[in-house]
Amino acid sequence: MPVPRETFLSSVWRDGIFKDKVLFCTGGAGTICSMQVRAFVALGGNACITGRNAEKTEKGAADIASVRPGAKVIGIVADVRDMAAMEAAAERCATELGSLDFAIAGAAGNFLAPMSQLSSNAFRTVMEIDTLGSFHTAKAVMPYLIQSVQKHKNSGKEEPTGTGGRIIFISASFHFRGQPLQAHVMAAKAAVDQISSSVAMEYGPHGITSNVITPGPISGTEGMERLSTADARSVKESKAKIPVGRWGEVKEIADATVFLFSDAGSYVNGVVLVVDGGAWRTTGADMGSTWKYPGFFLSGAVVEGVKGGKKSKL
Ligand code: COA
């Protein structure tokens, strides 16, 4: 479906800055990642997106390609938990599109569940998708990113062929202050932040930059949509707690991505760029009006709809 350009990109960026460059993005058909890729492709690049679901991934790729005549976007079915599959996906991307210059480790799994309803397998699943998946992605793309930065030097000067050799990890802010019902995600995303730090330190000497983007509450995402349809009062309260007084737009995550990949972001390495209107500083243990903190944990109530209906004694 055509998406108006102002939905996914600010008008401040120059067309063609990613001309002939290739972005590899895991989980690229998702609400936020697809807009990051769309912005990159709109500004001249081509892309490969990966996902587990063939139909969603292929449809997502075709949809993103429609943003610019002549754009090439390939959908590759691959599970980030499978190292060999990620290596094969990165190789296919570089072979079919001619290079692999940028990467986004975006694939993630999330659901709300208290520890009492979280099985060992549920915890492991999110750790494997988010943490191991990000590690696999970094390992699989790194040889190509190094080749790219050798051609497109990160000198801090305006290079004639533009930039290359950059990776962004998508994280979350839950672990900054703590968030009930997110034990699995807090553990996984804290680790993702540190994987990015390691890439920044160990591959920075090759010219690579590695950074994290931490989106806050973004309109149109699964979690925010759930809240919007459930309860208008919760939406109002949620927005009121954010310093800038509103939820973010997908465009604001795409803009941050373009900044980090562009010449404007050349000296930014090893940071966690939190794009949340300041939300993490004020929200803390908020669980919305459905589950009040801490009463929910003392009440013996359960989160409905948890897969397998698990509930341990404590
Ligand atoms: N609450 C508690 N446990 C859950 C759960 C939920 N809502 N969803 C899944 N699990 C548990 C399962 O019960 C299973 O544990 P078990 O074997 O002890 O029963 C374990 O997690 C693995 O689940 P499964 O569905 O087999 O894993 P998967 O690899 O197919 O998918 C997710 C895992 C996280 C991707 C899946 O739960 C999901 O689709 N989540 C919503 C979509 C999403 O995460 N989008 C990304 C937004 S960032």
Image: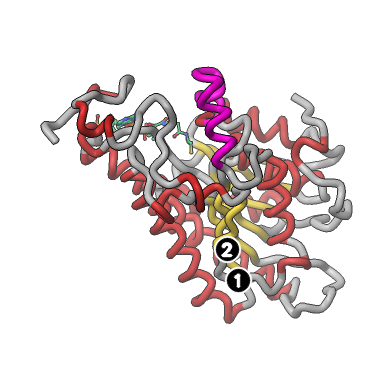
Near mark 1 (Cα within 10 A), the count class, few <14, some 14-19 or many ≥20, is many
Task: Identify the residue shown where x is 18% and y is 28%.
Answer: 311
> Where is mark 1, residue-wise?
269
Name the dominant secondary structure of the magenta segment. helix
Q: Depth check: give the residue in front, 214 or 36.
A: 214
Find out whether residue 228 is within the magenta segment.
yes
Q: Is the CB of mark 1 within 8 Å of ligand 1?
A: no
Find out whether residue 98 is within the magenta segment.
no
| CB contact under 8 Å: marks 2 and 1 | yes
Where does the image place residue 160, in percent across and percent down from the top left? Answer: 87, 71
Q: Is residue 273 left or right of residue 69?
A: left
Task: Identify the residue shown where x is 54% and y is 72%.
Answer: 200
Where does the image place residue 276, in percent across and percent down from the top left? Answer: 60, 48
Query: Ligand 1 lies in which image quarter?
Result: top left
Task: Identify the residue shown where x is 69% and y is 75%.
Answer: 150
- Residue type pointed to by label 2: Asn
Q: Is residue 139 left or right of residue 228?
A: left
- Kindly give the residue lying farthest to the left in the view shown: 313
The magenta region covers 224-241
- Residue type pointed to by label 1: Asn
Near mark 2 (Cα within 10 A), the count class, few <14, some 14-19 or many ≥20, is many
Gap between marks 2 and 1 measured at Cα: 6 Å
Q: Earlier in the sequence, mark 2 or mark 1?
A: 2
Instruction: Please identify the quadrant where the N terminus is shown.
Output: top right
> Where is mark 2, residue-wise?
211
Q: Is residue 105 left or right of residue 97?
A: left
Task: Identify the residue shown where x is 68% and y is 74%.
Answer: 267
The quarter of the displayed image where residue 195 is located: bottom left
In the image, residue 75 above or below residue 232: below
The mark found on residue 60 in the picture is none
Residue 236 visible from this viewpoint: yes
Q: Depth check: give the residue in front, 7 or 65.
A: 7
